[in-house]
Amino acid sequence: MKRSARLSSAVAAIGLSVSLAGPSAGGVVEYEGWLYGDEADEALEQAEKYDVPVVIIKQFRDTSCPKCIGAGRTMVSAKANKEMVRIVYYVGEGAAELNSAKTKALYNKVWPQVVDPSNIAPDMYYTTTDGKALGFVPYEEPHSARDEGKAVLQIGEWRSSVPAEVAKADRDAERGRYKQAMEKIDELIEQDAKVSHLIQQQIGQAEADAKMPDKPVSSFFPDLRGEKHAEYLAMAQAELDAARQLVADDKLKEARRALLPLSRGPEDFETTAAAKELLDEVTEKLRG
């Protein structure tokens, strides 16, 4: 199942709808399909289970301001929000009793990451379930929710594709194609840096026209390269040790077959230069 379909199914399972509402009869500003209180806690638990992005709108508990009501309606109507868990974080008198524990915790992780967040409600925050900010929509620019939401969904699509790409690299390594395996991992690291930079721009930590830094500010997979480099190098070392044993046993043709892929490995593998040197020795012996 494609991620977009899976997200839609997950959101549908939580029971969210899309139609909008304004202030309720009780004075609390509500949007149908946007949750608070115990329902928000349950939805966030589902979001964690399905790895669905979360969008939080900060809203006054009660307001008659037409600009605030209009901005809120514009923000929540962004089409991309349909594929996320939608939460309301209330501010103002009487708001504390409406906000769930999970909502409070998540909001308090996200808003400090945004540069110059609005002091006016409503504004909107996009986030992962563990509190990594993905985007921000200020009160003054409610229509930006459309493009911001689209970008967040694209980021989610990429994140969901990473495990499958890592699995492809693993298969290359298992077949002795260590150079190709590390190239796949390095490509993912480069993509991660680009995504990180995009997020920095979306939350105001980088200017819109700023160049991407040499080192990602806040990547999703900061340890991936180091872990995979160590894992694949250990595999290559085991194969090199086995090739050395073949040479010791005077099984030169078998040793040569084993050494050929190792000699074409990544330049930053210690095994690559050692394999080349041993391959030259074996080749000379076979010629002799």
Image (cartoon, grey):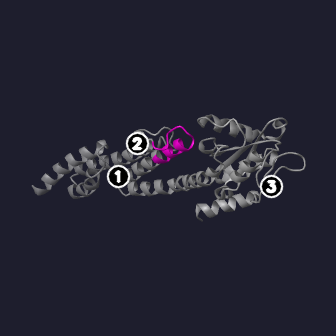
Q: Is residue 192 above or below residue 119?
A: below
Q: Is residue 216 left or right of residue 35?
A: left
Q: Mark 3 or mark 2, which is nearer to you?
A: 3
State yes or no: residue 203 in magenta.
yes
Q: Residue at x 37, y 52 (%)?
A: 183
- Per the model, the C-alpha gap separating discs 1 and 3 is 56 Å
Label 3, secondary structure: give it.
loop
Residue farthest along the front direction in this orientation: 66
Residue type for callout 1: Tyr
- 66 to the left or right of 124: right
Residue 232, visible in the rendered structure: yes
- The residue where tag 1 is placed is 178
**Mark 3, residue position:** 21
Amino acid of disc 2: Ala
Where the C terminus falls, by quadrant? bottom left
| Alpha carbon separation for disc pair 1 and 2 | 12 Å
Write the start and end of the magenta stretch as one range: 194-209
Is 10 on the left-hand or right-hand side of 32? left
Q: Residue at x 52, y 41 (%)?
A: 200
State the residue in front, 266 or 206: 206
> Which of disc 3 and disc 1 is earlier in sequence?
3
Q: Which mark is residue 230?
A: 2
Q: Position of residue 88 (x, y in %)?
A: 75, 46
Mark 1 secondary-structure assignment: helix
- The 10 Å Cα crowd at callout 2, few under 14, some 14 to 19, many 20 or more, is few
The quadrant the N terminus occupies is bottom right
Kindly identify the amino acid type of the residue bearing the numbered disc 3: Ala
Task: Determine which of the numbered discs, if any, sits on residue 56 in the image.
Answer: none
Looking at the rendered structure, the secondary structure element under dot 2 is: helix
- Tag 2 or tag 3, which sits nearer the N-term? 3
Cα gap from disc 3 to disc 2, whole angstroms: 54 Å
